[in-house]
Amino acid sequence: MKYLSEFRDPDAAKALHKNIELAASKLSEPVKIMEICGSHTVSIFKAGIKSLLPSNVTLVSGPGCPVCVTAMEDMDRMIALSGMAQEKNLTIATFGDMVRVPGSFTSLEKERAKGADVRVTASPLDALRWAQQNPDREVTFLGVGFETTSPTIAATVARAKDDNISNFSVYPAFKLLPPALAALLNSDDVAIDAFICPGHVSVMLGADTYRPVAAKYGKPCVIAGFEPLDIMLGISVALNLLVNKQHEVYNTYKRAVTDEGNRTAMDLLMKIFRPVDAPWRGLGYIPDSGLDFRDSYAEFNAITRYGLSEVETGSDPPGCACGDVLRGVMDPPQCHLFGNECNPESPIGSCMVSSEGSCAAWYRYSE
Amino acid sequence: MTTDDRILISHGSGGKKSQELTERIFLKYFNDPALLLMNDQAVMDIDAKKIAISTDTYTIDPIFFPGGNIGSLSVHGTVNDVAMSGATPVAMSAGFILEEGLMLSDLEKIAESMSVAAGEAGVRIVTADTKVVARGAADRIFINTTGIGILDGKTNISGQAAKIGDRVILSGTIGDHGIAIASSREGIEFSTPVVSDSASLNYLVQTLLEAVPEGVHVMRDPTRGGLATVLNEIASQSSVGILIEEAKIPLKEAVIGACELFGFDPLYLANEGKMVAFVRESDAEQALEALKSHPLGRDAMIIGEVVDNHPSKVVLATLMGGRRLVDRLTGDMLPRIC
Ligand code: SF4
Ligand code: SF4
């Protein structure tokens, strides 16, 4: 029996902590570092990393959880689709976190309780298999995710086409990370000095993706893995880059991330989908930040198949500050619904639902 | 009856088939004199002023898992619930809800391991009942139990009794049961397979209480909801703060790996053969030694203490040197999606 794995070595943590303090002492002004991804946010909270940071270094969470950033209009349409499920003999397949996100009127969870066939899976291939096994039913997969998840879904669509499985479709609500970063940096009230970029998305995108952001906006981007030590290393590198005014991309996760990323996966993604302007929760429409089916795969689009653009959609819940939370301009406890009306058991906004949403992480782990 | 016989609705009719089932399986393994009288109740002589009673219902998927099955689990769980009050468990009941179609050979294995588990714990199964329900109305087999234990009158152990300064002692590694279940459910195998820790803790408790008869304030077994949930319950019942150290919490390497794979936090995983004890500071080392002297407490550690700040909250000092809240579990643990 061992108490620790090598990624959790307290001595290494102490050394990195010293490094962080040293770099921070050389900063001329306080800095704000954004960890873009929800998985990083949770790892940071779970390891208590925020409590270790010097007072002139702040970490804020970014728009990196696909569940959190799914716009209300997409949520409402997906839920409306589940409302048609019984009449249309339809199965909805979705990632688990989506089930509890409240829409304007109801949620997938409530529709499921009324009899809609809503099934949770971590794999789009499961959904395709259900379609294959039940030719008399339709199966729709709710397609959320960044470049980490979307290539797998693209591969599933390609398989459906090759195998002529016509009772399968996908609701495309995918998001692309680089345009979102650019949009963040273009907005006036966002003051971020550096980014910690998620390892897994970067495996697909490659380190080169961040070079334009680093160069154009002068913000260091550090790619980091998900273990607590990976993240501490990422923070310490980011601080050193800031101290030395080096606005570059630094890859601390070379064990998995290359400069050019996974071209095969990205090419497949772009063969099936094309970039389109897309709505984000709290951020509005961002140019070329979403994906829609290319014409040759349009038959798999659940939005057109079920006429979902006609569905009535609502707006974000009143008082919910998810938008400001996702942009890193507000910490969740500053939202006046936080912890009172809004908690993980009865969430109001998506950031409180998703297991890696920023509000849920603050609620769970913050003293 | 042959090996591929199954439970039929008629096994629950009260008629001949029922009798056949009782004789073929239950009386074969449950042969306590009180039960053999075949009355609807057991009459026992218990010489005590104070008794502890607990009831629980067991449903688990899969019903057979690495390290046990629903039958052994139901005995261990019942014994532990009683033992955590400081009582000596003496007897239990068992009620079975069987789904039509259950393999009789499976039922037999379950009954047999109940009888073995009860024997090991020195607990009599004194009364039992069976109902059969139609296919789909239950998931193969549910077991309801009631356990009875005798208190010697000296011990005053309860969730309200944690005091500032108490040391928190954990009897061994956590998460083994949760991971054994999750991996057999998902069909995932690890190079070192994780086996459920399901076990009766009454003798471990006895060893502890003999070593420090006055020193134990709280005992609890971190079953569903795990260590985090149990510590939160005690913190709020006793209105005290609890500070635990991540570095002190024993974890098997394979459990750490599996948690990463599934996206679980071991603090919330179920255990079926572990206990936490809150022991006054002056008795803590002796209590630890006593636990370690017993095979089920070999890996015991002092993992933290009761503190006078943050009342009703549990805080973890992390391996990274930081601190964070350990919240109660809300909702199901969902696997990560990206
Ligand atoms: S909550 Fe789920 S979807 Fe959001 S970042 Fe985490 S893993 Fe990804
Ligand atoms: S606390 Fe709730 S209401 Fe407030 S921003 Fe977060 S999710 Fe929205």
Image: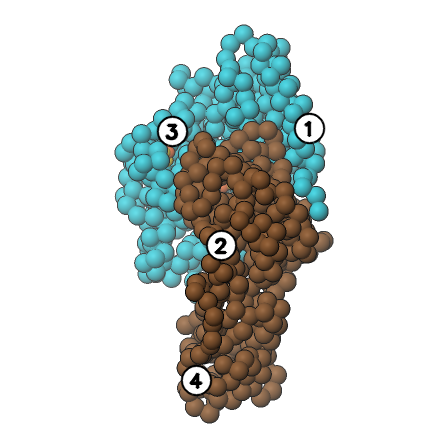
Contact (Cβ within 8 Å) of mark 4 with mark 1:
no
Q: What's the residue type where badge 1 is placed?
A: Asp
Q: Are discs 2 and 1 located on one and the same chain?
A: no
Identified at 46% across, 52% down, the residue is: B156
Q: Which residue is mark 4?
A: B39
Q: Hue of chain A?
A: cyan
Instruction: Read off the chain for label 3.
Output: A
Q: Quadrant of residue A224?
A: top right
- Disc 4 element: loop
Q: Is B75 rendered above or below residue A21? A: below
Q: What's the residue type where badge 3 is placed?
A: Pro
- Disc 3 element: helix
Nearer the observer, A216 or B263: B263
Q: What numbered label is drawn on residue A11?
A: 1
Q: Is A279 rendered above or below residue A75? A: above
**Cα–Cα span, label 4 and label 3:** 61 Å
Q: Are discs 2 and 4 located on one and the same chain?
A: yes
Q: Which residue is mark 2?
A: B155
Specify few, some or many for label 2: CA neighbours under 10 Å numbering under 14, 14-19, or 20 or more.
Answer: some
Identified at 31% across, 29% down, the residue is: A336
Q: Which residue is mark 3?
A: A333
Q: Earlier in the sequence, mark 1 or mark 3?
A: 1
Q: What's the residue type where badge 2 is placed?
A: Thr
Q: Hue of chain B?
A: brown
Specify few, some or many for label 4: CA neighbours under 10 Å numbering under 14, 14-19, or 20 or more.
Answer: few
| Residue A26 shows in the view | yes
Instruction: Read off the chain for label 4.
Output: B
Contact (Cβ within 8 Å) of mark 2 with mark 4:
no
Q: Position of residue B139 (x, y in %)?
A: 47, 69
